[in-house]
Image: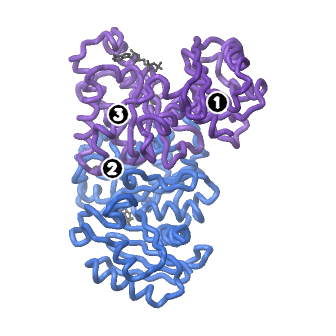
Chain colours: A purple, B blue
Amino acid sequence: MLGAIEAGGTKFVCAVGDEDFKIIERVSFATTYPEETLQRVFDFFDTYPQVKAIGIGSFGPIEVNKQSQKYGYITSTPKTNWRNFNFLGEMKKQYSIPIGWTTDVNAACLGEYKVGSAADDHSCIYLTVGTGIGGGAIVKGEIIEGFGHTEMGHIIIRSHPDDDFDGFCPYHKNCLEGLAAGPSIEKRYGIKAENLDANHKIWEILAYYLAQALVNYTLILRPEKIILGGGVMNQVRMMDLVKKEFSFLLADYVETPDLDAYIVTPSLRDNAGITGGLILARQAL
Amino acid sequence: MLGAIEAGGTKFVCAVGDEDFKIIERVSFATTYPEETLQRVFDFFDTYPQVKAIGIGSFGPIEVNKQSQKYGYITSTPKTNWRNFNFLGEMKKQYSIPIGWTTDVNAACLGEYKVGSAADDHSCIYLTVGTGIGGGAIVKGEIIEGFGHTEMGHIIIRSHPDDDFDGFCPYHKNCLEGLAAGPSIEKRYGIKAENLDANHKIWEILAYYLAQALVNYTLILRPEKIILGGGVMNQVRMMDLVKKEFSFLLADYVETPDLDAYIVTPSLRDNAGITGGLILARQAL
Ligand SMILES: Nc1ncnc2c1ncn2[C@@H]1O[C@H](COP(=O)(O)OP(=O)(O)O)[C@@H](O)[C@H]1O
Ligand SMILES: Nc1ncnc2c1ncn2[C@@H]1O[C@H](COP(=O)(O)OP(=O)(O)O)[C@@H](O)[C@H]1O
Ligand SMILES: [Zn+2]
Ligand SMILES: [Zn+2]
């Protein structure tokens, strides 16, 4: 039996699954203080002593560099209670089994890569467009990381000529996340994204931003698949608008798979991250 | 003994080297017609029957997907004589030894990764800023590629407010290459880049473009090193200007190695590509 934690900034999911990465049981609870939240994690896994390894996909930024003293820590998160928290260390104190460690989006990417939308591919990108924008990439089975984990949501893009919003990223203002994450809608119009009319012109503008990001990811990584998740992708026209803009911006410069097979939704849906956690657990063995 | 070919659009370099990737002999000649040029390649390697494998780093676009019927071809290059040329196939007809195949910039990246500026790193990017802009990336020893090879020079960036040049990329106009490759200077000012004053404001503008690219590469790949080569980097102030802009644009959002150790020149200089070819030959064995 394998264990997994999807540690999000607003909620935690814990699950146990079998060797085929099928979820056997899953629980979910709010993210509060580290001690309290970890206690609930322990309460769950203590009932499964047969778990052989656990995989954690965590919100961040986190330290993924094994050479670092801070490996396994959540580092400079805006959630002050969790800043500098030795998440992996606390888990290892409690359980003397192998524990895998990566970002929430890398875990989701791994889930989709192994048993989801990219199960037949050798490379993929997973991008979530929600409260923030984050992404993970896998090439030839390896999670792309180096000096640290990726931060694909903060890349530099061009502003749309019809968009006079300055962007809300505290670091960069008008990076991709600053211009196109869900909260940008409320900051522009004072109304939640899900309540804005489906024909509002902002959806084309957001698609233009997302498509620029996908063009840059495509040119820099040449993945076989791009998987788009997160709340904003629930907007009915968004997927089609993104594909249309992508095609226009790439201008056929490089070949991609047919767009309907290239830019897709996560087939594991809300279970991408936790499934990735199970896979990470397996890999830690 | 190992063999290598650096196949450029204007000149070819052929070399033989030892198992430590030291060059024993190297020749160079103009790129003319495929048959004529290949004959000169054969003339060189025919004198070295002891060569056990050859590595080719070629100008492109080329087909690198082993599943493709066109694997080993130069594909849609603007050099019409070379379009649809089965480079690897012609080489294999002549020599029945293992032959490695990748892009010129991937080969240069491999050279720098194994025995050059990134020899102590686990990941790096090599970017050449010359007549065009091209790049290669290696993460955990693997060349980053998927549906095809990367085209990092054509990413979307923001235009500088003081730059009214439209860009000269035939596909995208104002992509990175369209705005910042060497010929953009001549198209702006009617004077070759190397003849323009070192204090001209355009160097700051070019640095702004290159820095944007490096920020995006950094966020998408988190490499341990970025190596900048190509004619434009000979401009005396360019390296410092790029680092300054990079630091400003990244806004300390993610950690990188110290900038003087992170953004560097190729220590193999003009031999990065051909050395990478020797390494590719070794890997093909
Ligand atoms: N139908 C919708 N259209 C556009 N935006 C939506 C829609 N549904 C939710 N959102 C936005 O998605 C964001 C939440 O994304 P989600 O992925 O669910 O959460 P998180 O990123 O916090 O994990 C919010 O900004 C919300 O306004
Ligand atoms: N000192 C310099 N400053 C700026 N640009 C330069 C300088 N020297 C050469 N260049 C430019 O570099 C380009 C050639 O780059 P190079 O890397 O040598 O060739 P290629 O890309 O064809 O392999 C030309 O556009 C040239 O004008
Ligand atoms: Zn940002
Ligand atoms: Zn271009």
Q: Which residue is mark 3?
A: A264
Mark 3 vs mark 1: tell me if same chain.
yes
Q: Is mark 1 within 8 Å of ligand 1?
A: no
The structure residue drawn at horizontal position 34% and vertical position 72%, both measured from the top left corner, is B87
- Residue farthest along the bottom direction in this orientation: B47
Mark 2 surroundings: few (<14), some (14-19) or many (≥20) residues within 10 A: many
Quarter holding the N terminus of chain B is bottom right
Cβ atoms under marks 3 and 2 closer than 8 Å: no
Q: Is mark 2 within 8 Å of ligand 4?
A: yes
Q: CA distance from mark 3 to mark 1?
A: 28 Å
Q: CA distance from mark 1 to mark 2?
A: 43 Å
Inspect the image, locate mark 3, and give the three-letter code of the amino acid beneath it: Val
SS at mark 2 in the image: helix
Q: Quadrant of ligand 2?
A: bottom left
Q: Nearer the viewer, mark 3 or mark 2?
A: 3
Inspect the image, locate mark 1, and give the three-letter code of the amino acid beneath it: Leu
The structure residue drawn at horizontal position 50% and vertical position 50%, both measured from the top left corner, is B240
Q: CA distance from mark 3 to mark 2?
A: 24 Å
Please state the chain letter of the residue tagged with numbered disc 2 in the rendered image: B
- Residue A43 drawn at (x, y percent): 71, 14
